[in-house]
Image (tube, rainbow, N blue to C red):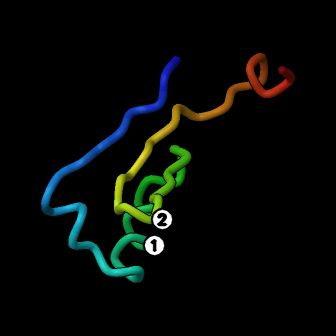
Amino acid sequence: MEPIKLKTPVLDRLTEEEFAQFCLDHRDLRIERNRSGHITIMPPVFTESGFK
């Protein structure tokens, strides 16, 4: 499964604290933000895919 890349004005304006809270609110997802402000959401790792 491919990661989801989000680019919206609301998410671009998140402070570091707000982004950290966003990540805490969605602990079941792997969320990253790059220097450009793009947020990438990757599906959770399950047992089978975690072994690969």
Left or right of 37 in this view: 8: left
**Quarter assignment of residue 10:** bottom left
Instruction: Spot the residue most to the front.
Output: 36
Q: Is residue 23 above or below residue 20?
A: above
Q: CA distance from mark 2 to mark 1?
A: 6 Å
Q: Going 67% across and 31% down the picture, which residue do you hit?
A: 45
Q: Is residue 36 above or below residue 20?
A: above
Q: Quadrant of the C terminus?
A: top right
Amino acid under disc 2: Leu
Q: Which mark is residue 20?
A: 1
**Quarter assignment of residue 9:** bottom left
Q: Going 29% across and 44% down the picture, which residue do you hit?
A: 6
Task: Pinpoint residue 48: horizontal percent, then vertical percent.
Answer: 77, 17
Q: Going 45% across and 59% down the picture, which residue do you hit?
A: 33
Q: Which mark is residue 35?
A: none
Look at the numbered discs 2 and 1 and tell me whether their residues touch, using CB distance below 8 Å: yes
Amino acid under disc 1: Ala
Q: Which residue is mark 2?
A: 24
Q: Going 36% across and 39% down the picture, which residue do you hit?
A: 5
Task: Pinpoint residue 36: horizontal percent, then vertical percent.
Answer: 37, 61
User: Which sits in the foreground, 3 or 22?
Assistant: 3
Q: Is residue 40 above or below residue 36?
A: above
User: Which sits in the foreground, 27 or 49?
Assistant: 49
